[in-house]
Amino acid sequence: EVQLVQSGAEVKKPGESLKISCKGSGYSFTSYWIGWVRQMPGKGLEWMGIIYPGDSDTRYSPSFQGQVTISADKSISTAYLQWSSLKASDTAMYYCARQESVAGYDYWGQGTLVTVSS
Amino acid sequence: QSALTQPASVSGSPGQSITISCTGTSSDVGGYNYVSWYQQHPGKAPKLMIYDVSNRPSGVSNRFSGSKSGNTASLTISGLQAEDEADYYCSSYTSSSTYVVFGGGTKLTVL
C-alpha cells in the first residue's frame, strides 16, 4: 500500500527555523517526483515545488523560490520542506504528494500544520 | 489571484449533473493535456479525481468525468450524491516557470 506519512504539527516563533518531513512507503521512492503544496487557513491550494528523490532534481514555484528549501534523503525514503526564518504568514497546512502524472498527484500525506506566532 | 479561474461555488440537487469549469491560457490548460481535478472534504487531504484531462484513477467513481475545450477544462459529476459536497480544485502544467498551477477552488453544495 502506497503511503506518505508526514511529521506532526509544529508551533514556532517568527524567525525560527523548521524542517518538516514526508516519508514514503509501499512504492519505489526514487522513481516518482514528490511535490509540496501549501494551504493557508480557509484558502486554496498553492503549488510550492517538487523534487525527484532519485537524483534530487528540484523545481520551485517562483512564489516560493528562496523562501523554502526542498530536499530528500533517498536512503530513508523521506522528503523534506524547510524554512530558515519563519514568518507569521507561513502559518498553513503543508501537504506532500506523489506525482503520478504532470500536475497529477495521486497519493497525499495527511498534512503538517505549521503555526507561526509570537 | 489564482492562475486558473474556477467559479467560487456551484450547487445541484441529488441525482442531477453539475459541471465545474477551469479556465486558463494557451500556456497551461490549452497547451497541454495535463489537467487534473481534486476533491477536498473539510479537514482532509485532497484526493485526485481526474488526471491528464479525462483519466480516472482506480477507485474513483465513473460519475466523475473530465474534458477540455480550448483553454477551458471541465469536471462533470453526474448522479449527484450528498457525499460529493466538497471543494474541487483543478490544476495544470504550465510552460511558465511555475510548472504547476492550481485553480482557486469551487465549493460544491448538494441541495
Image (cartoon, grey):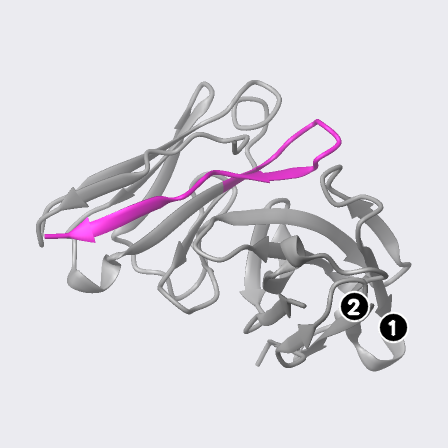
> Magenta segment, which residues?
B91-111
Please provide percent x and percent y for residue B32: 59, 28
Determine the residue positioned at 79% across, 71% down: A19
Does A111 sit above or below residue B25? Answer: below
Query: Residue under mark 1: which chain is it in?
Result: A
Q: What residue type is labelled 1?
A: Asp
* Percent x, y of residue A31: 77, 63
Would you name the residue on which mark 1 appears?
A73
Measuring 60% from the left and 64% from the top, which residue is drawn there? A95
Circle nearer the N terminus (2, 1)? 1
Disc 2 versus disc 1: nearer the observer: 2
Q: Which residue is drawn at 84% across and 51% down?
A: A58
Classify B5 as above or below B79.
above
Q: Would you name the residue on which mark 2 appears?
A: A80
Q: Do the residues labelled 2 and 1 touch (CB within 8 Å)?
A: yes
Label total for image: 2
- The correct choice, above or below, for A60 with respect to A87 in the image is above
Viewed as shown, does residue B19 lie left or right of B33?
left
Circles 2 and 1 on the same chain: yes
Q: In which quarter of the image is the N terminus of chain A?
A: bottom right
